[in-house]
Image: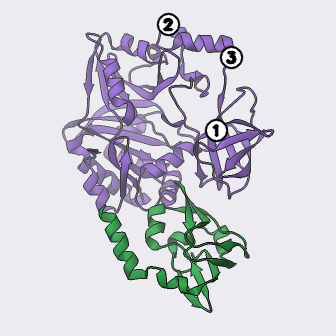
Amino acid sequence: MTRRTPLEAEHRALGAKLGPFAGWTMPIEYGGTLSEHRAVRERVGLFDLTHLGKVEVTGPGALDLLQRILTNDLSRVQPGRARYNLVLNDAGGVEEDLIVYRLADERWFVVPNAANTDKVVAMLREPGRAEVVHHDDWCFLGVQGPRSLEVVGALFPESADLSFMSCLETRYGGERLVLTRSGYTGELGYELFAHDSLAGALWSALMAAGEPFQIEPCGLGARDVLRLEMGYPLYGQDLLPDRTPLEAGLRWAVAFEKGEFRGREALERQLREGIPSRLRGIVMEDRRHIPRPHYPVFADGSKAGSVTSGSFSPLRQRGIALAYLSPADGFEPGRPVEVDVRGRRGPARIAAPPFVDRSPR
Amino acid sequence: MRDEGGGRARVGITDYAQDALGDVVYVDVPEVGTRVTASQPFSEVESTKSVSDVFSPVTGTLVERNALLDERPELVNDQPYGDGWLAVIEMTDPSELDALMDAAAYRAFVEQAEKH
């Protein structure tokens, strides 16, 4: 049995194609991935992201608990702010990536990937450390695009005060609502978390507020293209239990100076002994070659690695990809490589993401 | 596919197929003169989410390719039975056409497949 979003009726009424995603039935696209991509890059799009986890961690022990499980330094995150974090295994491999919002001094809001929510909740539920509430009955809506402030601000005027990677708590229809300025598209954007019973009213109100800007409902297909254009790695494709954050280029999300956390020793060992590969951006030279996951990448005639995420960038009008390439220091931006596109060698170049000139700040 | 007469068939993908594929961003149609075989892949259609082989409905020689698609691959979505055609194939054995489903039979086939 797959989980259903409380907005399934709204999606069907809008002609969505629904599909399986991480145990859920979610909208993959409505009007088409390209049109939805354009809406987010030029105007505004509305996403149903209810499949992601919504977990609240509260109490005097919450900070310590999070500091030992996650890689970034949450003691430096002020209430009302947010930070990107990883969960590692003992070998230093990436088990999860997530954003942690500090709602109040001793109250944190954690948003894991759908596929990892149960795993993260189990880790956090160490006896006696903190109160952990899994908001399994909450919805999650994303409003992304240059006009998103006008849309969200029509419902929540206080959103104008939110800087990038900030959060606040407010009320809607008499119920709690967590409002954040964050996203996975590279555009100005807001994310809203509230009880399922508010989902329909919120969706309709946001669609109505977005009408002057031709807001489009957007599915997970567009979200994947948008995040890849920014070079944001995706857990399960680019972030993997057998690759470390040093390999993924996420050392900035690892705070060695904060003290102990799971996976730390393995990362220190890798720093001493050498990093075997590095996640790199690749842009194809020829519009006809579109890289896809698992396609081999060649440099100077020998295999250097494989594509982990690849797609067509509507903004660049070229295929773009992420790939772990070895050696880690061998692939500076501009270096020519070749991607094996089903038997044809497609010329390409290493590029430092983002692949497009956009920023969520 | 449309019977153009004179042993020629104009080949494309169905409206159902283009809808299932999603937004098409690249179409690979081989050069004129390429030999194609019934039920074998002869072209690739790439959408934002995946790449799919297109199987030739007939055996023969490709005598025309739709060059419009090089610049406007979205025609496959917008006009699958019009300007979004892929190629014209000169059939080795025009009687192969008799074995193909007509539109009504295809619709019934798709509806049946949707139920499963």
What label sits on residue A4 in the rendered view? none
Judging from the image, what secondary structure is the residue with disc 1 in?
Answer: strand
Of all chains, the one bearing label 1 is A
Q: Tell me, by letter, which chain the rendering colours green.
A: B
What label sits on residue A274 in the rendered view? 3
The lab-note entry on whether marks 3 and 2 share a chain reads: yes
Q: Colour of chain A?
A: purple
Does A74 sit above or below residue A204? above
What label sits on residue A259 in the rendered view? 2
Give amino acid for label 2: Gly
Judging from the image, what secondary structure is the residue with disc 3 in?
Answer: loop
Q: Is residue A107 visible?
A: no
Q: Are marks 3 and 2 in contact (CB under 8 Å)?
A: no
Q: Is residue A271 left or right of residue A202?
A: right
Going from the N terminus, do you reach mark 3 or mark 2 first? 2
What distance separates the C-alpha of mark 1 from that of mark 3?
20 Å
| Most foreground residue, A158 or A343 | A343
- Residue at 32% x, 69% y: name it: B112
What distance separates the C-alpha of mark 3 from that of mark 2?
22 Å
